[in-house]
Structure formats: C-alpha cells, structure tokens
Image (cartoon, grey):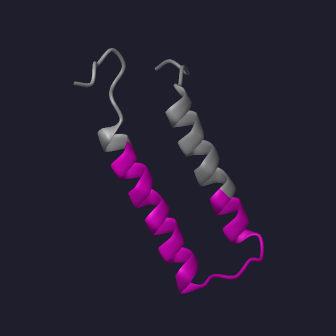
C-alpha cells in the first residue's frame, strides 16, 4: 500500500480529524454531537461515491 493520497482524501481526513478533536475537547457527550459526526460521515461517503477514480474521465 502506497502512502500517496490525492487532495480529496487529504481534505476529508483533515476535516474529520479537526471535527472529532473539536467535539471531544470538553470530555462530555451529547446526542447532537453524535448526529454531527454521523452527518459528516454521510457527507464524506456520498462525496467519495461520486468522486472520480484516478484515470477515470467524467463524461
């Protein structure tokens, strides 16, 4: 496995790390934080589904 990631993968990883870090800073949990994490996961999953693979031409 190579460690070559394109910009989309790096951005998704960075956003998820920042969001999780922000949500667990206070040490407490709330149902809305869980919903926010699930919504973020859903957005990343849908965008990854429609993101073209390497070498694939849209059209």
Q: Is residue 27 magenta?
A: yes
Q: Is residue 53 magenta?
A: no
Would you place residue 51 above or below residue 14 in this image?
A: above
Residue at 74% x, 77% y is 27
Residue at 54% x, 19% y is 4
Instruction: Looking at the picture, tell me which residue is in the foreground, 30 or 36.
Output: 36
Magenta stretch bounds: 19-47
> Residue 13 at x, y = what percent?
57, 43
Is 14 left, or right, of 12 in this rendering? right
Q: In the displayed image of the protein, which residue is found farthest to the left?
A: 59
Instruction: Looking at the picture, tell me which residue is in the foreground, 58 or 45.
Output: 58
Would you place residue 5 above or below residue 49 in this image?
A: above
Q: In the displayed image of the protein, which residue is found farthest to the right?
A: 26
Residue at 71% x, 60% y is 21
Majority secondary structure of the magenta segment?
helix
Quadrant (top left, top right, bottom left, bottom right) of the C terminus: top left
């Amino acid at each position: 496995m190579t460690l070559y990631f394109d910009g989309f993968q790096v951005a998704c990883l960075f956003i998820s790390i920042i969001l999780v870090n922000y949500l667990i800073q206070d040490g407490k949990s709330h149902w809305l934080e869980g919903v926010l994490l699930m919504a973020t996961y859903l957005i990343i999953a849908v965008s990854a589904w429609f993101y073209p693979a390497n070498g694939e031409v849209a059209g």
